Amino acid sequence: MSDSLEFKRLLENDSSLEFTSEQILRAVEFRDEVLKENEIQNLTRILSPVDFLEGHIRDVVHLRKSGFVSYPALDLGAGMGVPGLLSAVIYGNPGSEKWISSDSEGKKAEFAQRMIDHFHLDGVSAAAMRAEEVLTTQHVGSIVARAVGPVSRIYAWIRGRSTWNNLILLKGPKWEEEWAEFQATAQRNHLILDGEYRYTVGEEKKSRVIIRLRRK
């Protein structure tokens, strides 16, 4: 891609990422694959080198730094593969860090499977089904969700399954409002706020937070 070198330089010049040369090359290659696939199906609007770094890469980096995820982890509504697939591309699959990339849209799941094969990701599987269907047969350490809806909607999908205990949410500045709305529902005592990890992205220092909720 014409701007791949620009993206590579952004990653190389950002010491906060703590990426090796190999990790940088894999991140660049993954973005190239996303750009190609985006011409066929809508994976993401966050595509420019700077936007991809601030909108995708940093979420993956900070999710890892948070230490919140227990494995195996289910990426609910994985879409283009953030955070699970991209995390595996960058960090590999040391030990038992396994991901299930779940998306009910078959074409997105097919893209995930191609990336699993392309990058030889032994610790990742793709599921062309809703998360609650995956949870019918598989136990997971954590469910991780980014940009798939408010906590009340996500919980409504998965509350009938007993195969999970932790829900990890990647959220923006309106999280407090969203949580307050959930606390006003009949399910308010079903989830306990078990951890928060806050960070900012971009020159505008946009606020983001990773939430860990524990099932009561």
Image: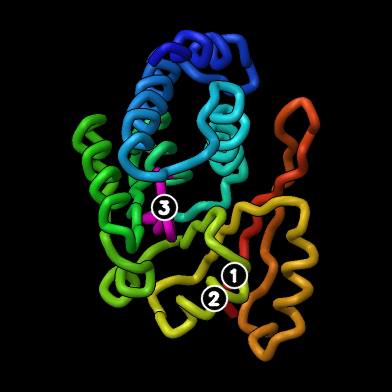
Crowding at mark 2 (Cα within 10 Å: few <14, some 14-19, many 20+): some
Residue 76 magenta-highlighted: yes
Q: Mark 1 is on which residue type?
A: Arg
Q: Is residue 207 left or right of residue 145?
A: right
For image coordinates 54% across by 32% down, the residue present is 57
> How many neighbours does mark 1 have within 10 angstroms: few (below 14), some (14-19), or many (20 or more)?
some
The crowding category of the residue bearing disc 3, from other C-alpha atoms within 10 Å (few below 14, some 14 to 19, many at least 20), is: many
Does the stretch in magenta take in 126?
no
Which region of the structure is painted magenta? 72-81
Along the line of sight, the residue nearer the viewer: 37 or 88: 37
Circle 3 sits on which residue? 78
Can you give x and y, in whole percent of width and height, for residue 193 in the image? 69, 68
Residue 155's tag is 2
Badge 1 marks a residue whose secondary structure is strand
Residue 10 screen position, x and y as percent? 58, 14
Q: Which of the two discs, 2 and 3, sits closer to the camera? A: 3
**Amino acid at dot 2:** Tyr
Q: Are marks 2 and 1 in contact (CB under 8 Å)?
A: no
Secondary element at tag 2: helix
Q: Please, what secondary structure does the residue beneath circle 3 have?
A: loop
Residue that carries the numbered disc 1 in the rendered image: 214
Q: Quadrant of the N terminus?
A: top left
Seen as rendered, the residue at the extreme bottom is: 186
Type of amino acid at the residue the image marks with label 3: Ala
